[in-house]
Image (cartoon, helix red, strand yellow):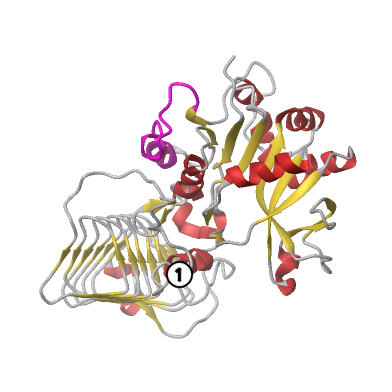
Amino acid sequence: MVKKEMIAMLLAGGQGSRLGVLTTRMAKPAVPFGGRYRIIDFPLSNCINSGIDTVGVLTQYQPLRLNTHIGIGIPWDLDRNVGGVTVLPPFERNINTDWYTGTANAIYQNIEYMESFNPDYVLILSGDHIYKMDYEVMLDFHKKKGAAVTLAVMPVPMEEASRFGIVVTNGSRLITEFQEKPENPSSNLASMGIYIFSWKILKEALMANADQPNLDFGKHVIPYCHEKNEKIYAYEFNSYWKDVGTLHSYWEANMELIDIIPEFNLYEEYWKIYTKSQAVPPTYVGNDAYVERTIVGERTGIYGRVYASVMGGDVLVGEGSEIRDSIIMNGAHIGRGCYIEKAIIAEDAVIGDNVRLGTGDEVDNDTRPDIYNHGLVTIGERSVIPDGVSIGKNSVVSGEFTASDFEGGALPPGSTLIRGGERR
């Protein structure tokens, strides 16, 4: 039997509904980030940089883009004869066939995969956070403490602690209490959703709780281990970590990359972030163009002016257009004479000539103010925006449109225009 000291199980099946139209056609971990990466590149790169060469990627929602991106794992040096990266979707069984119904249920349904490597330890990861972490250091902590389970935690401001799963520890970092989004938290140590389990403990906990509906680590598996008096420790992480689960946090994390001295550096030699890439022509900046504090992907043509933005590859910015504080994803084409401010334009969208994005005052979005807020304009993948229209702040537009879909050539702030010209 193959023997691996530690394998990783990467949960990448989430829909990411709080990212709105960005995840209509893809799982959240496949969403582009930082001009040339996708969100899943970060935990995958952490694995190979930490010496972990066996990773199971658990997919479910809209997996095609994610599966195509991962392939056989070549960019991360995970194309191995033994181990490497394996995509693990739900599959048909003789009995108890089901979709993954919770984080721990997804792991439970892949017990046979884990068992085939006879691991000493299993690392559980989420596929939708931006950070760099050496999991080997966390494993050393786990071993030193003789832990059954180790949770990665990070300090958060006390006034924000009620938004998180909070752990209370003693002086040796042994966890004495769990508080799930407490009104009056006793600690500011928030769980990051990164766990190391000793394999025998994990297997027993999964088997014992297999019948729980929506089997979850935070609600079922870890409390079960706690009740069994297993030693559960908190490993404190104090570097950059960003949950890009909302449109605003996603936009914010991208904008932080272009700070003069970014808190999160994509280009450190000793901790590279790897991604699928192709040999493509370089970027072209026209004679009258201007680019300032902007990340620009390959094969992009800029003929206008771009300030403080993040642009993917194969983007075109027409003459006379001005873009500020925006994210322009791969393959998007911006026409001539546009003014775009604080927008997220998804892949392969086409923006006509003389379009204005981000006009008017900030008013609540008329359908999902919880998603479309903070003054952002969101344009969905493959959308077509006709010439000469203006679209207000906190609006979302997704689909192919003509001028007749925009009354008076404008979409007021806070509007929703999705598919077939229907407003919702």
Q: Tell me the crowding category of disc 1: few under 14, some 14 to 19, or many 20 or more residues within 10 angstroms, Cα based.
A: some
Residue where numbered disc 1 is placed: 256
- Compared with 197, 315 (above or below) is below
x, y (%) of residue 317? 21, 67
Residue range of the region highlighted in magenta in the rendering: 65-83
Residue 85 in the figure: left or right of residue 226: left
Residue found farthest to the left: 287
- Compared with 93, 142 (above or below) is below
Residue under the point 57% across and 25% down: 91
- Foreground pick, 7 / 102: 7
- Foreground pick, 270 / 208: 270
x, y (%) of residue 271? 44, 51
Residue 344: which quarter of the image? bottom left
State which quarter of the image contains the N terminus.
top right
Is residue 390 at least partly visible in the picture?
no
Residue under the point 18% across and 70% down: 318
- Compared with 401, 203 (above or below) is above
- Amino acid carrying mark 1 in the image: Glu
Kindly state the secondary structure of the residue where label 1 is placed: helix
x, y (%) of residue 66? 43, 41
Residue under the point 54% across and 42% down: 12
- Foreground pick, 125 / 265: 265
Residue 419: which quarter of the image? bottom left
Is residue 49 at least partly visible in the picture?
yes
- Foreground pick, 144 / 52: 144
Residue found farthest to the bottom: 361
Residue 320 in the figure: left or right of residue 105: left
Asked if the magenta segment contains residue 411, the reply would be: no
Number of callouts: 1
Residue 122: which quarter of the image? top right
